[in-house]
Image (cartoon, rainbow, N blue to C red):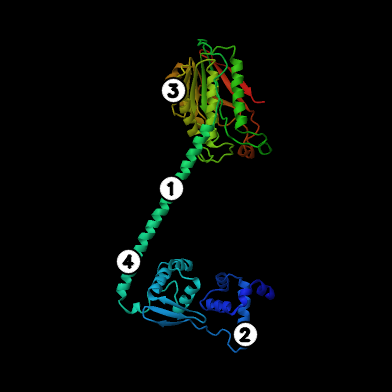
Amino acid sequence: MRAFSYTQNREVSGIGWLNEALELREAGLTQQEIADELGTTRRAVNSRFYRHDKQQKLAGTAEGQEEQKPSIVDHGDYYIVTSRIRTLEITKAKLRQLKQLYCEQKLTINGVCRELDMPRRDFWVVKSAFGITKDDVPYLDEELEGDIEELVDQSLERKKQQYFIRLQHREIELALKELEQYRKKDYQLQKIHRLISEHEWKYDGPTIPLRPKVKSGLMLEVPIVDLHLAKLAWEPETGENYDSKIAEKRFMDVIYDVVERARDTDFEQIIFPIGSDFFNYDDIAGNTTKGTAQDNDSRWQKMFLKGNELLIRAIDILAQLAPVKVFQIPGNHDTQISFYTIVNLASYFRNNENIEVDTNPKTRKYIEFGKCLIGYTHGDKEGKRLFGNMQIEAAEAWGRTLYREWHTGHLHSEQVKEEFGVKVRRLSSVTATDSWHAESGYVGAIATSQSFIWDKHRGLREIWYSTIQ
């Protein structure tokens, strides 16, 4: 192993190299630091020192004898420092600057050497000769013999200068960080703009001929609740696959099924509530309104664009059958984004007399049709209070009507309960089971959507089930 070190590091065999290494050792460097300084390995340094120390023992030098520090000769404005193999000159001004940088400003050795354009080995010789440490005072010994108060004032003045310099550097750093943040935001805005610009949606409107308005006394209600557009489910984990494309197909299958059944019926009006967890998440991080993380397959921009496309197509198709009234029911997954969507739909259909879009932000909405009063809410907040909300919030309509129902979502399964003259009907969903529901045992609900036919005088006449195959 020793022969390998000598053959691979031949420079370590020279007397000059050894003297430099010993000089660095005298200055207090470790073997690894000496190896780094001289461009070799720690093993080679250790081996060479071992041979040297052994030779010194044989020559009679006691092991552990204190090494002689480099000598110092004062020449007025400068010092001559002589180590075992080297002599160097350093001015007192430069030595003072070295101590200020190293002891006062706490620069690293490399930092000091860069500032003073000084070789590291010269620094170590000077450091060893004058016994300089990090905690040393930033003055020469002879200066400490003078006016101490003046030296303190000078130190304070330098610290003030260092403070303002550091403050300026920090301001520059903060400005650069702020600039970087603006650049990131600008990049995101450009990315969104590119996404929207490149998003081509070729849509020429529905192919169903528009029907004339009639007075049939019938109203069609199409509440497709809890679609959870952009939800991601994996069959091996949840029992079925689900993503944006599957959600789109299921949603449009319901619309086409309803239109097919409605071909031979004349309706005065169609009610089309949106929201109620139409979207799967509500923020740019992929969480629900309250911050619950979701499994998603789409970026929020893409989800928003696709959702608006689906709703525009559905509303346009339904409007060929009868005038459509659209309003938003906030869900616990999509409170914000569903409101943005209803505002967008109001703008899109603003000149269509056959389509009314209501942007009222209230959580609960009411539709009065003859003797029928239907209330809408997502159903995640009210609990048993829901049975009394209608009488308070729609008191006049309550007095005019006989057939009263609440239509809610949230639980993804059909449930009906009647109390105090009002039915609360929870509606089914066409969405799939996600990982959380599968793990929690909420499985087995049939993927179906209900649509309702209301008679002005006789109340609920029919329920159409659009079941996903």
Closer-to-camera residue (223/62): 62
Q: Of helix, strand and loop, which one carries label 2? A: helix
**Vertical placement of 439 versus 17: above or below?**
above
* Foreground residue among 429 and 44: 44
Residue 197 appears in the figure: yes
* Residue 268 on image: x %, y %: 51, 13
Mark 4 residue type:
Glu
Instruction: Tell me which corner region of the image, top left, top right, bottom left or bottom right, holds residue 234.
Output: top right
The residue positioned 45% from the left and 21% from the top of the image is 350
Q: Earlier in the sequence, mark 3 or mark 4?
A: 4
Q: Amino acid at mark 3?
A: Ala
Label of residue 157 in the image: 4
Residue 422 seen in render: no
Instruction: Quarter of the image for the C terminus: give it.
Output: top right
Name the residue that disc number 3 marks: 394
Disc 2 designates what residue?
55
**In the picture shown, does residue 201 fall above or below 107?**
above
